Image: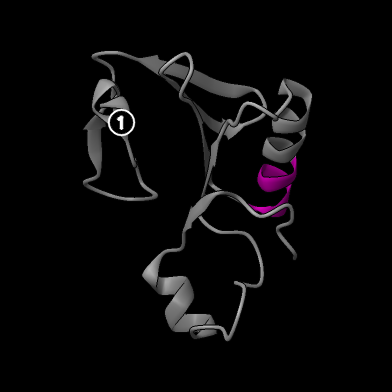
Amino acid sequence: MDCRPFPDAAFVRQAAIDEKGIPKGYWEGAPDLAVEVISPSDTYTEVDEKVDEWLDAGCAMVWVINPRRETVAVYRSPEDMTVLRGDDILEGGDVIEGFAVQVRDLFV
């Protein structure tokens, strides 16, 4: 399945790379994690549509980073969203095991 629009950043587990191989060009299918950084020209409707498309395509997790508000919205499904800020810890969970960073450190 195609995962367009492309996220600003993405993570694919090693198991998927071992199975499919390293592509020449874009990764076919959904990454395990899609990351979108909201830019001044983005509308919330556009960002919401992208999140829905990535989750529908099979992304296990989507992070939406809002530099203006210094927040990260973490989506596991359209119904499962948490907004993190300040001293909250952004974790990779079962997608990027061992990854953890304080949200405020993303905006230094």
Quarter of the view holding residue 103: top left
Q: Which element is circle 1 on?
A: helix
Q: Residues within 10 Å of mark 1 (few under 14, many from 20)?
A: some
Residue displayed at 33% across by 50% down: 96
Q: Is residue 20 above or below residue 58?
A: below
Find residue 56 and report its horizontal and vertical position in percent.
73, 46
Find residue 104 and report its horizontal and vertical position in percent.
27, 21
The magenta stretch spans residue 104: no
Image color mode: one colour
Q: Main secondary structure of the magenta part?
A: helix
7 left or right, relative to 21: right
Residue displayed at 21% across by 46% down: 98
Find residue 64 and report its horizontal and vertical position in percent.
53, 31
Q: How many tags in the picture?
A: 1
Residue displayed at 62% across by 73% down: 26
90 left or right, relative to 7: left
Image quadrant holding the N terminus, namely: bottom right
Image quadrant holding the C terminus, namely: top left
Q: Is residue 84 above or below residue 64?
A: above
Q: Is residue 32 above or below residue 64?
A: below
Residue toward you, 48 or 77: 48
Q: Which residue is mark 1?
A: 106
| First to last magenta residue range | 53-58
106 left or right, relative to 5: left
Quarter of the view holding residue 78: top right
The magenta stretch spans residue 57: yes
Query: Which amino acid, by three-letter code, is at mark 1?
Result: Leu
